[in-house]
């Protein structure tokens, strides 16, 4: 009996890995700071904090895979951090800036976004081992946060009053929430081999993207995440169109044979 207990302790060691969880904590802190800044009216600072949380969230997964320190604790902690940084913070941000002027409809739209983020994360955790790694099912919550935070940052920087575009912003918020819980597929870009050799001109793409973001961060970041958000529905429509053409061709061929 004692030997079994010792063996169990060895297979389930106590403690957590420090490095990847530090990045997760940084993402959590940035998300919490974004929520506080949004409630105080510092919407540009809040948006920047959300994008910083995205960088930290990306690094924690990369570091965990590179150092072989992936654990169930880290996965759960990462999901809780994502809920704050990409669910609660953007919802409070867009509500404080614009949706508050719509009364009950405004906070309901903000809640739908937060609920969509929670449902998206729960589905991802339960289906992470059963889906094609090349695609995400539904809009990833960091990309959704990029659309919401980017729109708030863009409007705030260019002096657009939130009350003037409250209805379009509420529609955008609800659509983004719906995309997160949808079954529309989005490219995950996980199939890209970062260790392999690539042609020289491929290196120019990220350089140009970074340069464009540096010129006008609010505009470019919103454009990048908005384009990614609509890429899923567009690719789905193209696939349905191809399948429809293939179906009619097969049907016409079978009719000709008969």
Image (cartoon, grey):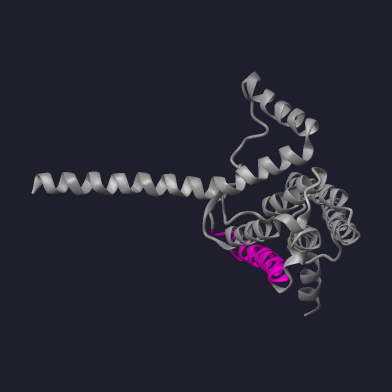
In the rendered image, residue 67, in percent from the top left (x then y), is placed at 78, 46
In the rendered image, residue 169, in percent from the top left (x then y), is placed at 68, 57
The quadrant of the image that shows the N terminus is: bottom right
| Residue 114 forms part of the magenta stretch | yes
| Camera sees residue 63 | no
User: Image height check: is 48 above or below 178?
Assistant: above
Q: Quadrant of residue 86?
A: bottom right
User: Image height check: is 190 above or below 24?
Assistant: above
In the rendered image, residue 131, in percent from the top left (x then y), is placed at 54, 56
| Residue 44 forms part of the magenta stretch | no
Range shown magenta: 105-130
Q: Quadrant of residue 215?
A: top right
Could you tell me which residue is drawn at 78 percent across and 38 percent down? 217
In the rendered image, residue 66, in percent from the top left (x then y), is placed at 75, 44
- Relative to the observer, which residue lies in front, 5 or 257? 257
Considering every residue shown, the one lying at the far top of the view is 200
């Amino acid at each position: 009996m004692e030997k079994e207990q010792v063996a169990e302790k060895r297979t389930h060691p106590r403690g957590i890995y420090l490095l990847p969880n530090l990045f997760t904590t940084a993402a959590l802190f940035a998300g919490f700071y974004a929520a506080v800044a949004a409630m105080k009216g510092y919407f540009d600072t809040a948006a920047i904090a959300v994008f910083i949380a995205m960088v930290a969230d990306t690094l924690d997964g990369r570091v965990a895979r590179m150092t072989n320190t992936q654990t169930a604790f880290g996965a759960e902690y990462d999901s809780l951090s994502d809920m704050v940084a990409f669910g609660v913070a953007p919802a409070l941000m867009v509500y404080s800036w614009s949706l508050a002027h719509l009364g009950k409809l405004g906070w309901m739209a903000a809640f739908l976004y937060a609920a969509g983020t929670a449902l998206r994360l729960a589905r991802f955790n339960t289906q992470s081992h059963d889906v094609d790694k090349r695609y995400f099912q539904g809009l990833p919550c960091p990309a959704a946060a990029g659309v919401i935070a980017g729109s708030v940052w863009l409007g705030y920087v260019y002096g657009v009053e939130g009350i003037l575009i409250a209805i379009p912003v509420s529609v955008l918020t609800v659509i983004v929430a719906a995309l997160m819980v949808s079954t529309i597929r989005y490219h995950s870009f996980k199939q890209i081999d970062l260790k392999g050799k690539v042609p020289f001109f491929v290196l120019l793409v990220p350089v140009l993207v970074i340069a464009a973001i540096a010129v006008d961060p609010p505009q470019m970041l919103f454009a990048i995440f908005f384009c990614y958000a609509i890429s899923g529905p567009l690719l789905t429509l193209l696939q349905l169109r191809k399948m429809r053409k293939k179906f009619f061709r097969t049907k016409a061929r079978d009719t000709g044979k008969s």
